[in-house]
Amino acid sequence: MRPAWILTALASLACAGLGGNAPEPRPEPPPVPVPEPEPEPDGAWVSAAVEEALAWEVMPGTTEEPDASGERAEALRRFFLAHPEYADPAAREPLAAHACGMDGTEAAHAWLTHPPPKTPVTIDDDRDDWRVLVVHADVHCTSDDWAWYSSEAVQGAQARGALTAWGGPDEDVVVVRSNGREVARVPLSGQGFLAARAGTEPTDLPYDPSVISEGLDAMFGPAP
């Protein structure tokens, strides 16, 4: 028979967990890492710029087939990725002003970053009563309406005896020569219709169909 003090000691050890086969505590499982969402590789601005460019490459007033294959969108995406300076929407506005009248956004970028030297629009009119009309625009991307009303202005000026010419973003001045001598030099800016005649001050008719005929009459007289 075991003495009572031994039984008491065994009971104490059992209560303390030293005398039994208590299960070992299980280690806590490591936390499962939550993957961070991958950022859009292009950046949101590139996607927005591509959508804008697909629209601004179409001349206002005209329609083109949509980019069904996605080839043009992909080319534009590569362009904007290579040119982060266009992340600012304001920096893209000059592209929109030229792209539809050139060979796309890339050509507009090349022209803006390396513009050719400005040249004059030169008109030779040997008449004593020389008269000229120059249709001019300082952007390559105009509109179907601009083409229509420009043609109307040219026909109206020619009916009134004026010689006509066209000036674009690469021309900044009109030079009129008569009998080999320069008789007028008028700077060009903006978009409109420059009318000039011997003995009168030149005037720039605005791109406003309601005043073109009236302005031609004032400068050249009414059409026959």
Image (cartoon, helix red, strand yellow):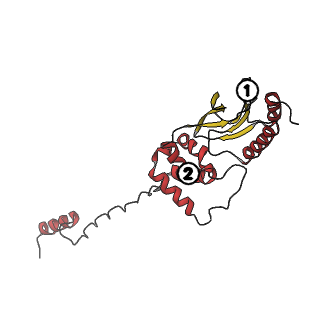
Query: Does residue 119 appear left or right of residue 201 in this picture?
Result: left
- Mark 1, Cα crowd under 10 Å, few <14 / some 14-19 / many 20+, is some
Whether 142 is drawn above or below 54: the answer is above
Q: Which quadrant of the figure contains the C terminus?
A: top right
Please state which of residues 101 and 151 is positioned toward the viewer in this rendering: 151
Q: Tell me if I can see residue 185 in this picture.
A: no
Q: Secondary structure at mark 2?
A: helix
Classify residue 134 by image quadrant.
top right
Q: Going 60% across and 40% down the picture, which residue do you hit?
A: 169
Query: Does residue 121 appear left or right of residue 115 in this picture?
Result: right
Q: Going 74% across and 42% down the picture, which residue do you hit?
A: 150
Counting from the top left corner in percent of width and height, residue 110 is at 50, 47
Q: Hey, what amino acid is under mark 2?
A: Thr
**View extreme (right): residue:** 224
**View extreme (front): residue:** 179
Please state which of residues 35 and 133 is positioned toward the viewer in this rendering: 133
Whether 186 is drawn above or below 109: the answer is above
**View extreme (bottom): residue:** 1
Counting from the top left corner in percent of width and height, residue 28 is at 31, 63
N-terminal of the pair, mark 1 or mark 2, is 2
Query: Does residue 182 appear left or right of residue 145 in this picture?
Result: left
Residue 105: give its label.
2
Counting from the top left corner in percent of width and height, residue 195 is at 73, 31
Q: CA distance from mark 1 to mark 2?
A: 42 Å
Residue bearing mark 1: 198
Q: Going 52% across and 45% down the picture, which residue do you hit?
A: 111
Classify residue 70 by image quadrant.
bottom right
Q: Secondary structure at mark 1?
A: loop
Counting from the top left corner in percent of width and height, residue 57 is at 62, 52
Q: Going 56% across and 45% down the picture, which residue do you hit?
A: 95
- Mark 2, Cα crowd under 10 Å, few <14 / some 14-19 / many 20+, is many
Q: Is label 1 or label 2 in front?
A: 1
